[in-house]
Structures are given as C-alpha cells and as structure tokens.
Image: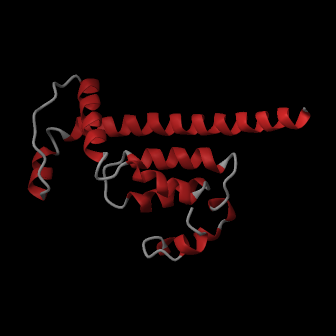
Amino acid sequence: MPKPETLQNHKHLQMFGKLLHKPNLWALNRRSAPLAFAVGLFVAWIPMPFQMVLAAALAILFNCNLPVAVALVWVTNPVTMPFMFYAAYLFGAKLLGHPPQEFAFEASWQWIEASLFTIGPPFLLGCLVFGIIFAASGYFVVHNLWKYSILFKWKNRAK
C-alpha cells in the first residue's frame, strides 16, 4: 500500500487538505477495511472520470481506509471496463423491460449526447444496481473473513 504521505501529497487529493490527516483513513482494521471495500467497489461501477477522487471523498466521509477504497476503483480499467459496462447495460435493459439495442461505441461527445436517452437509462440503472450489489457483497465478504480469521486465531491461541 502507498504511504499516507504519498497520497496526502497527490495533486488530485490535495483538495481534501487536513481531512486526509484522520488516522482511521490509514488504519486497516475490522471496521475500516469492509467499508473501504464497499466504497471502492461501489465507485468502480460509476461511469465517470476521476473515480479515485470520488472514492477518496467517500472514504473521508465514511471514515474508512482510503488507500483500499481508492485502489479498488481500478477494478474498472481499460481491459475490464467494456465487459463490465456492457453487462450493466444488459442488466439495466432487462430490469426496465427494454430489448437490448445494437450500438457501436464512439469516443465522442456527439455519440454520448445521442445515446444518453436511448441506452443511457438502462446503462445507468445497471451500473447503480451492480454498484450496490458489489458494494454490499464486498462489505459482507471482507467483514466475515475478518471475523473468521479472528475466531481462528482465538481457537489456535486456546489450544
């Protein structure tokens, strides 16, 4: 994990100033780790640039481990993003009862504007629902793994 000083001095995170000096943002414990997983996995499903800044803001707001939350947004990266976001679109279309539409992505503002009202609602709904599902799953998995590791250590100590 990066050192706290490295992230505190990062050009995009300096806007948070003294808020980055809260000790729990850098502690990895049974409360901060599961919440950081939830924050990071939720933000990973938000289709926006600078996800790391949003993850940092939410980590500060929820007082959870900032490096873990920021690192987890890289679940969506140039390799995984097309598959994840296409799955979110298909899931959102299914939830809304819309048949999936054929489309070809273009990296242009005109394409985004034209697609905002056709594929936008199913895509955004799918991203929101997947974000909530992955955040809740990440929270409970890490929480339970942490709990069972402590129980395992107590049992070994008792022996």
Residue at image location 29% in from the left, 49% down from the top: 79
Considering depth in this image, is 58 or 145 the residue closer to the camera?
A: 145
Question: In this rendering, would 146 be left or right of 96?
Answer: right
- Outermost residue toward the top in this view: 97
Q: Looking at the figure, which quarter contains the C terminus?
A: top right
Image-quadrant location for residue 17: bottom right
- Outermost residue toward the right in this view: 158
Question: In this rendering, would 86 be left or right of 152?
Answer: left
The x, y position of residue 58, in whole percent, is: 51, 55
The x, y position of residue 76, in whole percent, is: 36, 49
Determine whether 17 is above or below 128 in the image. below
Question: In this rendering, would 67 be left or right of 82?
Answer: right
Q: Looking at the figure, which quarter contains the N terminus?
A: bottom right
Residue at image location 31% in from the left, 45% down from the top: 80
Question: In this rendering, would 51 be left or right of 99?
Answer: right
Determine whether 141 is above or below 62 in the image. above
State the colouring used for the structure image.
secondary structure
Image-quadrant location for residue 3: bottom right
Image-quadrant location for residue 109: bottom left
Determine whether 43 is above or below 119 in the image. below
Considering depth in this image, is 159 or 136 the residue closer to the camera?
A: 159
Residue at image location 60% in from the left, 39% down from the top: 142
Q: Number of callouts in the render?
A: 0
Residue at image location 54% in from the left, 73% down from the top: 6
The x, y position of residue 49, in whole percent, is: 31, 59
